[in-house]
Each structure stands twice: as structure tokens, then as C-alpha cells.
Image: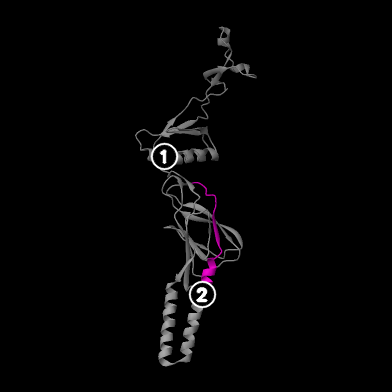
């Protein structure tokens, strides 16, 4: 079932005997057959008790999940080929016995004693492609309270998770654009005078020759900005993985950088938001 909210009930829950339940039922049937053949009242009573207990366990196991409401949270971005956490919100009007849940081919998470109200749970999965991806189908199941039956349901969340390209070290083309500032190093360019300019940066030599007043722009070699681009001769998808790794490293170092890939250009900057903007451009471009 595909929805952002999923309610467990009579039409969405399935229940079958477990292996232990099948053994229990076989034993009860055998005792019942022996009791009929031997006319043993005690054996007959034991067989009926076992069958009655199994019938009670079926309702109790079904009620363990009935009425539980599942909702999608807001998933945080993650890298492809790495474990990602998908947030789920469980709303319950009563306390629940333990149950298990997992995405298809993913690790199993055991939820012990779900309380009243809304409980957030992060369920792991491993995405393999970049872009906005949906997790696999979710399976939730329980054998509580007696282990005689398995009650389960399946659900496919509809809120996609942004998956950045897989990180892989490799060559990246780096282009350093012209960096200018109002410093006092060797000047690199000119611009028109603005109100409040410092006299030290005005090009008085040109003004003495009758030219309009202009301000010198100087380089700042201590804080270079880099524009990251795909390396020549590298497959574009592989280049995205190299760029993702380089962006992550530059962010860890606190350096300034920008990104240019195909028609997408991200101006140089730094910080968490800038890193996420560059990685999103790689994932969706």
C-alpha cells in the first residue's frame, strides 16, 4: 500500500500460525485423536485447552498491531551505498508488545514496548542510486504474546529521501576564478568609485591622466575560492562521485568552494547549507 499514512486494521493485517503454532496445533490434534480412541476424559480436556488457548492467541496477536498508525517523517539526505536512516512515526492509543520491522533486504529493528502517543523510529536502509529515492517496502510483524501466530503487514512509504552521489575519491578539475578585494596587495582589476571609498585604493595615476575615477581591486591569495568541475575524460556519473567526496573533504577543512556541472553553477561559499546545496546539485542535476 502506497501512502504517507498507514493504519493497521482488519483489511491491512494478515495472520498465520507460526512454526511453533503449527507444532502446537498438531500436538493438540494428536491428543484429541488419542482421547477419542481411548475415551480418556483427561486427554480430551487437555486437547480442548490447547485448542482454546490457540484460538485466544490468534485474537491477542492480531490485537497487538490493530489500531497502530504509521506515518512518514522528514528524511534527512544521505549518501548512496551507505546506510541511511528513514524516519517513521508510530502513533498508538495504548501500549504495545514487542514487534519487528524492516525494509526489504534490510536489517531488522526490534521495537520493545511501544508507548502511548507518537514514537519516532529511524529505520535503516541502503540506497544505491542518487536523487530522490523511495525506500523499499516495509514489513512489520509480531508473534506476541504467545508466539503461536505471526501477524504482519506491508507498507510502502511515499515521502522520498534525497540521496547524494556515492562518495569515491578520484580526480576533480579545479578552476580558480578571479578573486578580488579592497586589499593592498598587487591589484588585478578596476571598478567605478563608490561612496565612502578609501583614498588608498583609488587609481590616482589614471585620474591624473584625465580618466574617470576608479578603484583598484586586489587579490586575496590567503583565501582562494575554487570552482569544482568534473575531470576531463571521466564518466559523468563517476565524476559526480569524485565531486561528492571532494566537497565533503573541503567542508571538513572549512574551505571555500563552488561547483559547476553541466548547466548547474553554485557560487563559492562555505558552511553546512552550502555543502548541502552543492551535494543536492550533484544528486539532482
Mark 1 and mark 2 lie on one chain; the one further toward the N terminus is 2
Q: Position of residue 151 (x, y in %)?
A: 48, 67
Marks 1 and 2 sit apart, C-alpha to C-alpha, by 54 Å
- Where residue 134 is drawn, which disc sits there? none
Instruction: Return the x and y of residue 140 as percentages of the image width and height.
Output: 49, 62
Would you identify the image quadrant in which residue 38 lies? bottom left
Judged from this view, the residue extending furthest toward the right is 196
| Secondary structure state at the residue bearing disc 1 | helix
Exactly how many numbered labels are in the figure? Answer: 2
Q: Which residue is located at x 43 percent, y 85 percent? A: 32
Q: Does residue 226 sit above or below 143 in this rendering? A: above
Judged from this view, the residue extending furthest toward the front is 11
| Position above or below: 116 against 183 | below
**Toward the viewer: 55 or 281?**
55
Q: Which residue is mark 2?
A: 57
Give the image location of residue 269, x and y in percent: 53, 34
Depth check, front residue: 50 or 244: 50
What range is drawn magenta here?
56-77
Q: Closer to the observer: label 1 or label 2?
A: 2
User: What crowding class fits label 1: few (fewer than 14 Cα within 10 Å), some (14-19), or many (20 or more)?
Assistant: many
Task: Farthest residue to the top: give it.
Answer: 209
| Residue at image location 51% in from the left, 70% down from the top | 61
Residue identifier under label 1? 240
Is label 2 in a helix, a strand or a loop? Answer: helix
The single residue placed furthest to the left in the displayed view is 233
Image quadrant where residue 230 sits: top left
Amino acid at each position: 500500500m502506497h501512502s504517507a499514512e498507514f493504519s493497521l486494521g482488519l483489511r491491512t493485517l494478515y495472520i498465520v500460525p507460526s512454526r511453533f503454532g503449527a507444532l502446537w496445533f498438531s500436538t493438540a490434534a494428536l491428543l484429541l485423536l488419542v482421547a477419542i480412541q481411548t475415551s480418556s476424559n483427561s486427554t480430551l480436556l487437555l486437547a480442548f485447552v490447547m485448542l482454546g488457548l490457540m484460538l485466544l492467541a490468534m485474537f491477542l496477536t492480531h490485537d497487538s498491531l490493530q489500531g497502530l498508525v504509521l506515518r512518514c517523517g522528514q528524511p534527512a539526505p544521505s549518501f548512496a551505498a551507505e546506510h541511511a536512516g528513514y524516519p517513521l512515526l508510530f502513533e498508538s492509543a495504548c501500549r504495545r508488545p514487542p514487534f519487528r520491522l524492516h525494509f526489504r533486504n534490510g536489517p531488522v529493528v526490534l521495537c520493545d514496548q511501544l508507548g502511548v502517543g507518537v514514537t519516532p523510529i529511524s529505520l535503516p536502509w541502503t540506497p544505491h542510486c542518487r536523487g530522490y529515492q523511495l525506500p523499499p517496502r516495509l514489513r512489520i510483524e509480531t508473534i506476541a504474546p504467545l508466539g503461536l501466530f505471526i501477524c504482519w503487514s506491508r507498507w510502502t512509504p511515499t515521502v522520498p529521501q534525497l540521496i547524494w552521489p556515492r562518495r569515491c575519491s578520484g580526480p576533480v578539475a579545479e578552476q580558480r576564478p578571479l578573486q578580488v578585494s579592497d586589499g593592498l596587495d598587487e591589484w588585478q582589476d578596476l571598478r567605478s568609485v563608490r561612496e565612502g571609498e578609501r583614498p588608498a585604493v583609488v587609481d590616482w595615476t589614471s585620474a591624473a591622466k584625465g580618466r574617470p575615477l576608479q578603484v583598484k581591486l586586489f587579490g586575496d591569495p590567503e583565501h582562494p575560492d575554487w570552482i569544482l568541475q568534473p575531470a576531463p575524460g571521466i564518466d559523468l556519473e563517476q565524476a559526480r562521485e569524485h565531486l561528492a567526496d571532494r566537497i565533503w573533504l573541503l567542508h571538513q577543512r572549512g574551505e571555500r568552494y563552488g561547483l559547476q556541472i553541466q548547466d548547474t553553477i553554485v557560487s563559492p561559499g562555505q558552511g553546512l547549507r552550502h555543502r548541502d546545496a552543492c551535494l543536492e546539485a550533484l544528486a539532482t542535476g
